[in-house]
Amino acid sequence: MRLKGKKIATLVAGDVEDLEYYVPMMRLQEEGAQVMTAALDLNPVRGKNGLIITPDTTIVSLHADDLFALILPGGFAPDKLRRYLVVTNLVRAMNSAGKTIGIICHGGLIAISAGIVKGRRATGSLGIKDDLTNAGATWVDEPAFRQGNLVWGRVVADIPAFCRELVQVLSEQDG
């Protein structure tokens, strides 16, 4: 249990990619992390594939100082979440503190809106390749990798590689 007691938040909204939410959450829980699901409100969220997710907390109640890491799953949720200052402020605060942010598939849209990708390597769904490069990132077509405090995953098929990289990075951190 390498992450015992570490507080990690996953941001969700309607049409989040169910597998990109559930699999990393379960993998982190398996390592002992306390994974919280955060949304704009406490109403249940329907994932892109129809699974229902019940948030534990609201995004506005999260503070970077209290979190060990943040996870940004894909689907259509990131395009919705990126529009809220509370979301982009949290992502910027986590980044400024050097805390790990796990970003998979379309989750990179939130990182773009938070202004944290310029000059960094990045990946995600091909659907956001142009968005990432236009935001100043260098597109990398790899299943998963770390770039500083950011852990990137490409798509659903790459979830195992994303989870391995994420757990490895988090296991190396103090806090």
Image: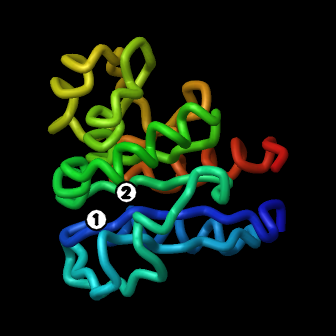
Please tell me how crowded label 2 is: few (under 14), some (14-19), or many (20+) other residues with Cα within 10 Å.
Answer: many
Residue 8: which quarter of the image? bottom right
Q: In this view, does 74 lie above or below 150?
A: below
Q: How far apart are marks 1 and 2 (CA)?
A: 7 Å
Q: Residue 39, percent across and down?
A: 35, 71
- Of mark 1 and mark 2, the one earlier in the sequence is 1
Give the crowd class for mark 1: few <14, some 14-19, many >=20 residues within 10 Å. Answer: many
* Callout 1: SS: loop
Residue 105 percent location from the top left of the image: 31, 46
Q: Seen in the image, is 16 located left or right of residue 166? A: left
The residue where tag 2 is placed is: 73
Q: In this view, does 14 lie to the left or right of 57?
A: left
Relative depth, front residue between 164 and 106 = 106
User: In the figure, 86 relative to 7: above or below?
Assistant: above
Amino acid type of the residue that numbered disc 2 sits on in the rendered structure: Pro
- Amino acid type at image mark 1: Glu
Q: Name the residue under label 1.
A: 17
Residue 54 x %, y %: 38, 87
Q: Nearer the viewer, residue 94 or 30?
A: 94
Quadrant in which the N terminus appears: bottom right
Instruction: Indicate the secondary structure of the residue bearing disc 2.
Output: loop
Q: Which residue is drawn at 56% across and 57% down?
A: 63
Quadrant in the rendering for residue 120: top left
Report the residue at 35% width, 52% height from top: 87
Residue at screen point 35% across, 15% down: 138
Cβ atoms under marks 1 and 2 closer than 8 Å: yes
